[in-house]
Each structure stands twice: as C-alpha cells, then as structure tokens.
Image: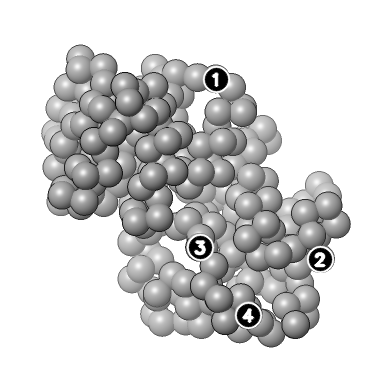
Amino acid sequence: MSKVLLVEDDLRLAELVQSYLSQHGFVVEVQGHGNEVAAHCQRFKPDLIILDLMLPGLDGFGVCRQIRPSFAGPILMLTARQSDIDQVLGLELGADDYVIKPVEPRVLLARIHALLRRRQATESGQTHELSFGQLQLKRRAREAFLAGERVDLTSYEFDLLWMLAAHAGQTVRREEIHQQVIGRPYDGLDRTVDVRVSHLRKKLNDNTETPFRIKTVWGKGYLFVADAWSA
C-alpha cells in the first residue's frame, strides 16, 4: 500500500481527501503546518506528497524547497491559484505536477496513480547506463554526472533527460514527452515540459539563450545533441 502525506491546513478538505484516498487503498497521514512537514516526512517516509501552497508557517513553495533535497518521491502541488507564475515556480522548485482546486477526486486519484506508475516503471526496469562525453546517466540509481560531478535532478528531470538521451540525434515530440514522462496528453497550453527543459539546460551548463546540448526544434519538440558533451 502506497503512503501519501497530505499537507493541507483546511481540515474539512483534508478529511475528505484522506477518506477518499484511504478508500482507494492508500495509507494517508495529514499535516497542516508548513514548519512540520520535513520532520513528518522523515518519520512517515511517504511514497508521494500532496502539498498545498497556502499553509501556516512555511508556504508550499518553502516546503518544497526545504524537502526536495532529501525526498526523492513525487510532489503533487494542490493549489487554488490559477497563475502561470505560481505553477512554473512550483515546478522549478522540484514539484512533479500540480492540480488546481477545486479538484474532482477522480482527477486527483488519476494524477496520483500516474505519478506512482511512472516512478515504479522506471525503478523496476533493467540496469541501463548512457554515456556521452562528460555526461553519464545511470538509470537504476537515477543519477546523472557531468564532468565527474553529480547533477542534482528531480525525478521528472531525470526521466526527461533519460528519454531525450535515449533518442539522441532524434527530435522527440512534445506530445510524446507529455504522454511518457508527465503521464497525460498534451493540451497545447501546458508549459510543464518547457519549464523542465529550461531547468535541465541550466543544470547541465547548456546555453539558455542559444542551447547547443538540448536544442528546441520549433513546432515539434526537443533534440538531444550526442556530440555536445565533450570538455
């Protein structure tokens, strides 16, 4: 049974979500204060965290920033905010997905299942390693090294980098990335993939203005350049 930590200070909503997820086979604990999430996470060891943005103490952004270095599981942000800026910031801080409140319970459940399936599928795969000059990727360990230094990647960032690297020299369409990495079809507006590619470029010392390692193929998708990783 997968364990979910629900970080939500609205007690009524928290009880409803906890009851619904429990009925669908999850072990759910609730935390309502941002300052207590890190300790609760270490004690409970959840497989997935549902994180509200508006919290007493540390807000959701602060919590995400605090726990991401030590928590490798998926983080699903639950927010009433509609702003693209809030959504992008959450993704940049390490969240894996976001759902805007009020959310249909079945939609929330589907997002949770998609996040957990993607992680389980990756972890259960055979050992694979990819190497391109100074870049080494280790799929089972979910680690990336550039010039011998470990690159700190979120779960989604690693999956995206692996997908692009596994198709080196080929244009990977945005629709394919959404389906395989994000776990849902591309609606033509979602900026999740663009944010993650931008983040990867920064972490992999690519030129963000004129990228030469992960190129944008306008109107199509992204291209991983195999020979761009030498010293």
Residue at mark 1 to residue at mark 4: CA–CA distance: 40 Å
Picture quadrant where residue 195 is located = top right
Mark toward the start of the polypeptide (1 vs 3): 1
Q: Can the viewer see residue 119 in this picture?
A: yes
Q: In this image, 3 relative to 205: left or right?
A: left
Q: What residue is pinned by disc 4?
A: 147
Give the answer, above or below, for where 66 lies relative to 98.
below
Q: Position of residue 133 (x, y in %)?
A: 69, 84
Looking at the image, do the residues carrying marks 1 and 4 touch, with CB atoms under 8 Å apart? Answer: no
- Count numbered badges in the picture: 4
Q: State the mark number for residue 64.
A: none
Disc 1, SS: loop
44 vs 164, nearest the viewer = 44
Disc 4, SS: loop
* Residue in the picture at 79% in, 60% down: 207
Q: In this image, 215 relative to 104: left or right?
A: right
Looking at the image, do the residues carrying marks 1 and 3 touch, with CB atoms under 8 Å apart? Answer: no
Q: What residue is pinned by disc 1?
A: 82
Label 1 crowd bin: few (<14), some (14–19), many (20+), radius 10 Å: few
Picture quadrant where residue 106 is located = top left
Q: Amino acid at mark 4?
A: Ala
Q: Position of residue 80 (x, y in %)?
A: 44, 18
Q: State the mark number for residue 212.
A: 2
Mark toward the start of the polypeptide (4 vs 3): 4
Q: Can the viewer see residue 170 in this picture?
A: no
30 vs 191, nearest the viewer = 30
Give the answer, above or below, for where 155 lies relative to 139.
above
Disc 2, SS: loop
Applied colour scheme:
one colour
